[in-house]
Image: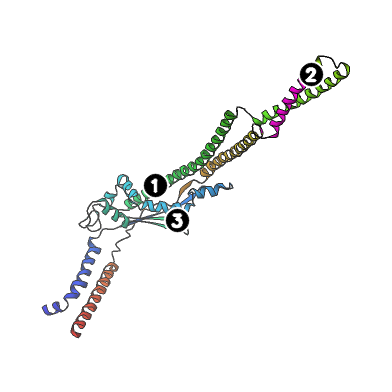
Amino acid sequence: MLVWLWQHLGFLLFVALPTLLGTVYFEIVSAPIYMSTAQFVVSNMGQTSLPGVSGFLANVGVAQSSSYAYSVSAYMSSRDALKILEQNASVRDIYNRPRADFIARFPNFLFGPSFENLFWHYSNWTQIYFDPIQNITTITVYAFRPEDSQVLAQRLLDLSETAVNRLNSRAREDVLQAAKGEVEQLQKRLATVQKQITDFRNRELMLDPNQQSTAATALGATLESDLVSARALLAQLQQLAPASPAVASLRSRIETLEEQAATERRKSAGGAGTLAPAMSEYDALLLQQKFVEQLVMAGISTLNSIEVAVAQQRLYVERVAEPSMPDFPFYPYRTEIDSFLVFITALLVYGIGRILVTAIKEHVLDR
């Protein structure tokens, strides 16, 4: 008997004993584990058809709903989500029910009550899967009681809605901030142009060079008319009364009118001290002001359109399947399958070990 035990000691230690321990655990010790599932879709309330607005939304980060579904799935699998579940769903109590066995419960003899160990346990007992083809996210939760698995799945669904609402708010703020920033830049540009016009008026001491030029032209026309009248009157006096004292007075007046008319003609002709350069600079400033004003009006109109588009682009969670209430444990199966799997695994490990030992012995003997 002892000889047989010695000859088969490896098989007994590495195959029979693990199979026996596994059978005892799965058939007697292990607690039933229940699974609850839920499904949801991150949908978009509407799509904008306004020209140019959809491109702007894409540039500032408003993407399709499928991209947000990835973010929601990642959030529900994160430590932040676990912290909320720890506060609101008593997840530690769910994983440490009295009916739980000493291996599957948390904490246990291998893992202490630290948050990192809890996160590792949560990651293994909760599965979040996103199907990019159907755009459906599936939540799978395991617990020691049916109601616990359902409650935890419900809490995760609530967290998904919270995450989508936060993404909505953040996207809305980012989009509107970007659009408002564009409008503010244009308004600052308009204010700069208006300041340049004010500085020009203060420097040139004139409100509008164009009006000044019009007034100068009218004055020149008046002077020319007075000059023609004065010359006609002088010619008439020279014919009728050449010795009249008024002749000298008219000649003096004509000289004065000629000088004034010449001055006004020089102002209109251009050059230093004339209105032409000032008119050119002022017209350029007015053209720039008009152009920027049109940009500001277009920016404000676009901002209003974006506000409407963002409201239409609102995301929401559409529940495809509510969390189920399991009526039968998902695991263990309470059949010979678990014990058979333990036996096959142990037998494979034992067989590989025997092959390695034999190969090592043959290698040593060959040397």
Residue depicted at 72% across the width and 30% down the height: 265
- Left or right: 155 in relation to 186: left
Decide: is 159 above or below 250.
below
Quadrant location of the N terminus in the rendered image: bottom left
Rendered location of residue 332, percent (x, y): 29, 62
Which residue does the numbered mark 1 point to in the structure image?
Answer: 158
Circle 3 crowding by C-alpha within 10 Å: few under 14, some 14–19, many from 20: many
Q: Earlier in the sequence, mark 1 or mark 3?
A: 3
Mark 1 or 2, closer to the camera: 2
In front of the other: 226 or 71: 226
**Residue 13 can be seen in this image:** yes
* Quadrant housing residue 103: bottom left
Q: Nearer the viewer, residue 240 or 69?
A: 240
For marks 2 and 3, give the CA distance. Answer: 102 Å
The vertical placement of 346 against 251, above or below, is: below
Q: Amino acid at mark 1?
A: Asp
Q: Is disc 1 surrounded by few (<14), some (14 to 19) or many (20+) residues within 10 Å? A: few
Q: Residue at x 15, y 79 (%)?
A: 7
Closer to the camera: disc 2 or disc 3?
A: 2
Location of mark 2 (residue) = 250
The answer to which quarter of the image holds residue 137 is bottom left
Disc 2 is placed on an element classified as helix
Q: Is 90 drawn above or below residue 203 in the view shown?
A: below
Q: Earlier in the sequence, mark 2 or mark 3?
A: 3
How far apart marks 1 and 2 lie (CA) works out to: 101 Å
Residue indicated by mark 3: 136
